[in-house]
């Protein structure tokens, strides 16, 4: 009989400890064929930004992160969101939306003590990478060709496109330049 009481006590204790801060998370890539998922590496937790707003800099969205938690402390759910973002190598998790759902009162079945309301939080955020500015050349003209020759070549190309000269004539004139 004593063993039975201990088992019941452990079962109740496990139930309440398990429900105190239960957090489930899920990461859903936005695009299945995104090449990022073949090469990503986790980032340090301290380098990931978590915000409910948007970023002022350019970014590339890579995934949606969902955290489903029960408990009264919402900051633990935000930490979980940050941790999941770091695991997939995101620079930030933005546009976080929080939905709360009341699930009743938490009551100890053994003593009857009421611990207060139980809320469930559904949090959704967008994991992003900062966009790296592309290197663009200031001039499209190759450095080994003078501007006057480039102009002549473009004029020849226009004449060929407009069918003023044949392909053979175009090739022959290009060789002369």
Image (spheres, rainbow, N blue to C red):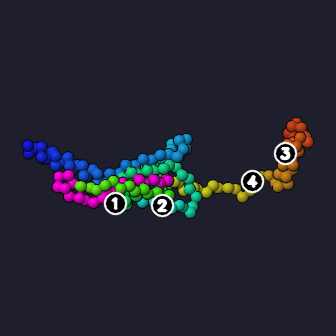
Q: Main secondary structure of the magenta part?
A: strand
Nearest the viewer among 26 and 135 is 26
Sequence order check: which comes first, mark 3 or mark 2? 2
Mark on residue 157?
Answer: 3
Q: Which element type, helix, strand or loop, lies under badge 2?
A: loop
Q: Which residue is mark 1?
A: 73
Tell me the crowding category of disc 1: few under 14, some 14 to 19, or many 20 or more residues within 10 angstroms, Cα based: few
Work out which residue is located at the far right of the displayed protein and give it.
164
Left or right of 137, for residue 26: left
Left or right of 164, for residue 101: left
Q: Is residue 77 magenta?
A: no
Q: Which residue is mark 4?
A: 140
Sequence order check: which comes first, mark 3 or mark 1? 1
Q: Which element type, helix, strand or loop, lies under badge 1?
A: loop
Give the residue at x 51% y 42%. 38
Residue 21 placement: quadrant: bottom left
């Amino acid at each position: 009989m004593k063993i039975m009481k201990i088992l019941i006590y452990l079962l109740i204790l496990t139930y309440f400890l398990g429900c105190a801060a239960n957090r489930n998370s899920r990461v859903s890539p936005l695009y299945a064929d995104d090449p990022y998922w073949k090469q990503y590496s986790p980032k340090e937790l301290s380098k990931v930004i978590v915000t409910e707003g948007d970023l002022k800099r350019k970014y590339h969205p890579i995934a949606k992160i969902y955290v489903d938690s029960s408990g009264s402390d919402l900051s633990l759910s935000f930490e979980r969101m940050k941790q999941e973002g770091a695991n997939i190598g995101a620079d930030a998790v933005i546009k976080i939306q929080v939905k709360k759902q009341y699930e009743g009162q938490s009551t100890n079945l053994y003593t009857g003590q009421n611990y207060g309301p139980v809320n469930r939080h559904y949090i959704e955020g967008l994991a992003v990478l900062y966009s790296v500015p592309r290197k663009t050349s200031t001039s499209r003209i190759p450095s080994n060709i003078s501007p006057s020759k480039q102009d002549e070549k473009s004029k020849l190309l226009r004449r060929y496109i407009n069918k003023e000269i044949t392909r053979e004539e175009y090739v022959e004139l290009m060789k002369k330049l």
